[in-house]
Image (spheres, rainbow, N blue to C red):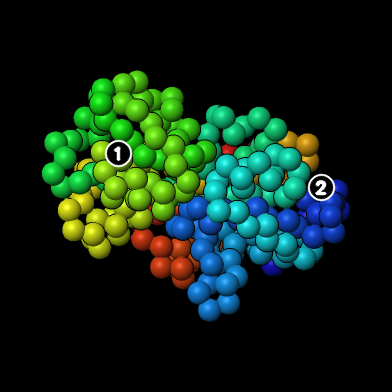
Amino acid sequence: MSTPLPAAVVSAFARAGALRASINLGNPILANKDPASGEPVGVSVDLAREFARRLGVAIELVVFEKAAASVEAVRSEQADIGFFAIDPLRSEGMQFTAPYVLIEGSYLVPTSCALQRNEDVDRAGTRIAVGAGSAYDLFLTREIKQADIIRVQGAKGVMESLNAGQVEVAAGIRQVLEAEAAGTPGLRLLPGRFMVIQQAMGTPASRGPEAGAALSAFVEEMKASGFVADALKRHRVQGASVAPAGHTA
């Protein structure tokens, strides 16, 4: 049985009387809508519910379609916790735990495309579709020097741009792109990955270091206990892996 959290930590996270968890449906590896009930389900939802149970408060899921909106909800104190890819541009006003899951980012191209390696993508004349405000967008904005980044709305917009011939490359979650390649003739995945996404939990910096430490300790326990691994298996997530142990403060 887990040790009860201090009252100060509980009040820091449940200022509105319940734990408000920002859930990003833009990352289908970690959250989706149940087709039967319409309710959010997934690894991040399981973690949110478990953390609320540890706090001894009710859970309120605040659902978004895009990562950027999900991040902003936490930064603006409209939610108490969230589940995000760690990125330097997201650190202002936020405190993150160590990652709980690692996800690969890959490139998808038409079979006829001359590009063969991830290193080939960054060249003049190449257009890369990416979800606006996503971890891929933030990473590629820093790393890409010659190719053009075309920012669209979510994974659906990325695929629509590729299929319409508006871009040469689609960037996104490896497993999602693999499924697209398997189900759509004329598409192939470039070998390997161009980045590893570190999925972590976050909370507003204003909640203080004690709250941040408690959230970090929770994530470490969820990894060590097998909770995250079980959730990945239960939700039939392929390709994502449990992150190694990290620091708790």
Q: In the drawing, does residue 51 fall left or right of residue 90?
A: right
- Toward the bottom, the furthest residue is 36
Q: What number is the disc on residue 167?
A: 1
Please state the horizontal and vertical placement of residue 75, each as a whole percent of the image: 70, 39
- Residue under numbered circle 2: 12
| Mark 1 closeness class: few <14, some 14–19, many ≥20 residues within 10 Å | many
Of callouts 1 and 2, the N-terminal one: 2
Is residue 116 visible in the rendered image? The answer is no
Q: In the drawing, does residue 101 fall left or right of residue 3?
A: left
Q: Is residue 148 above or below residue 16?
A: above
Please state the horizontal and vertical placement of residue 249, each as a whole percent of the image: 65, 38
Give, as a three-letter code, the residue at label 2.
Ala
The quadrant in which the N terminus is found is: bottom right
- The reply to whether dot 1 and dot 2 touch (C-beta < 8 Å) is no
User: Residue at left 18%, top 58%?
Assistant: 185
User: Residue at left 62%, top 32%?
Assistant: 91
Foreground residue among 14 and 110: 110
